[in-house]
Image: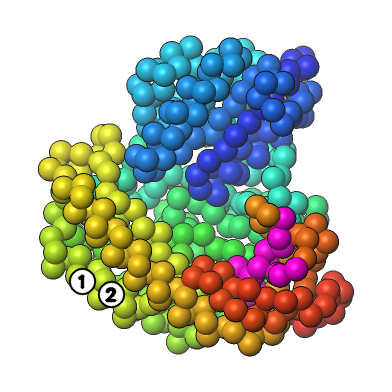
Amino acid sequence: MAFSGLRIYWEAYGCAANMADAEIALGILRNRGHEIVSRPEDADVIVIFTCVVKKPTSDRMLYRISRLRGLGKRLVIAGCMPTGEPRRIKLVAPDAVMLGPRAITRIWEAVERGVSILEEADDVKLGCPRVRRNPVIAIVPVSEGCAWRLCSFCIVARTRGSFRSYPLELVVREVRRFVEEGAMEIWLTSQDMGSYGIESGRSMLPELLETVSSIKGRFFIRVGMMNPLYVYSVKGRLAEAYLSPRIFKFLHLPVQSGSNRVLRDMRRGYTVEVFKKIVEEFRSRMPELTLSTDIIVGYPTEDMEDFEETIKLVEEVRPDMINISRFFARPGTPSEKLRPLDPRLVNERSRILSDVARRIALENGERWIGWSGYALVDEIGERGEPIARNICYRPIVVKNMRGDEVFGKIIEVEVEDARPYCLMARLKRIVSAEEAWEAIIVP
């Protein structure tokens, strides 16, 4: 018999996979008769989905946990912190219930019975009920865990468990379900999209994209982060798959350093040249591709020459977005044993790289001034403004409009100005669904 009647307040942080876990957990709880509330003070149980990939983020999680614990409600800690840093949780919330990311389908046991579950489960998350945060966007996990597991700085291999790819037919079924529910943007996500299907001996990501993009319906596909290590051998077919009009021309390819010596110390398994060849392959077919990458500044073995090589790479490749992280050792990783660099030095290098990245992002954005075309409004900004994405997944802020007027609609815009990480545009018109999709995607 279902245990009903609890009021649940929740918060979620971190990556798209964690957001999907939160949506699944809430769907399961709602199906069991529980009510989702918007204020922690009104809840019987508080659930927080945590992220620990970076130490500053982990510190913020602990602060938030301590504040929520003070409300005197049952507190369930989900996400990556229970498997990554359980001792830190115990220090600030010794009575908290902990639920690992591979046990998310058992959220009801944590909420209803106060049972902590940290071991891996074989449950498949696809097909579970959902409470989607954004009716326009549906997040579809395609695998769990990390296939590489050797990076010297990364805690994710421990927090997310062993690797498994979900069968292609289950992914297709999930995408169809969300498209039928009205989702217009499908996010294919995992800890590393490049490793999808690697159990077969190579990345099956091209086949995944070819199959999903052939599904009937009115939707776009955003492909999540992919490791250069697994993408390199299939880069040609993968770039070809990206030519589908359904797939956003958006490539999230983390390089982490412009120095091959540092990449070797990080145990990343690829070289700078591999990264550059993948980018060249994609840009040769999609010149307007939006390129996002990740860089760690201040790895313990990084010297000034290594850092200068990183700056040189950024100037050469000119990414549109760079997620810059200052190095902080994560517990249980090989790099935890290394002597860290002077924090002042790391902060200075981070500032220099941020300035370079911001300048390049602005220069890249300015090339879009004068562009007119279609964009999907998939977000409402903090001040209520509509934020749309074009086929290159460029964030476009529509001026002098309220987001709720056009949310979920395809609009035609003209870009009039650029900021480092978004374009500023005026609305030309709201486009009918039939016209938009006939122009963008062959039914």
Which residue sits at x=31%, y=45%? 154
- Check disc 1 and report its element: helix, strand or loop: helix
Q: Position of residue 411 (x, y in %)?
A: 77, 73
Residue, disc 2: 313
Q: Position of residue 171 (x, y in %)?
A: 63, 53
| Quarter of the view holding residue 394 | bottom right
Q: Position of residue 39 (x, y in %)?
A: 69, 28
Identity of the amino acid at label 1? Glu
| Quarter of the view holding residue 160 | top left
Q: Is residue 247 visible?
A: no
Identity of the amino acid at label 2? Leu
Give the label on residue 309, or none.
Answer: 1
| Quarter of the view holding residue 115 | top right
Point out the stretch of residues depicted in magenta.
384-400
Which residue sits at x=46%, y=33%? 61
Kindly indicate whether the residue at mark 1 contacts the one at mark 2 (C-beta within 8 angstroms).
yes
Nearer-the-camera pick, 299 or 212: 299
Apparent side of residue 306 relative to residue 3 in the rendered image (left or right): left
281 up-or-down from 44: above or below: below
Pointer 1 local density, CA inside 10 Å: few below 14, some 14–19, many at least 20: some
Nearer-the-camera pick, 420 or 268: 420
Q: Position of residue 425 (x, y in %)?
A: 67, 76
Total marks in image: 2
Give the label on residue 344, or none.
Answer: none
Q: Is residue 36 visible?
A: yes
Which residue sits at x=39%, y=47%? 146
In what quadrant of the picture does the C terminus appear? bottom right
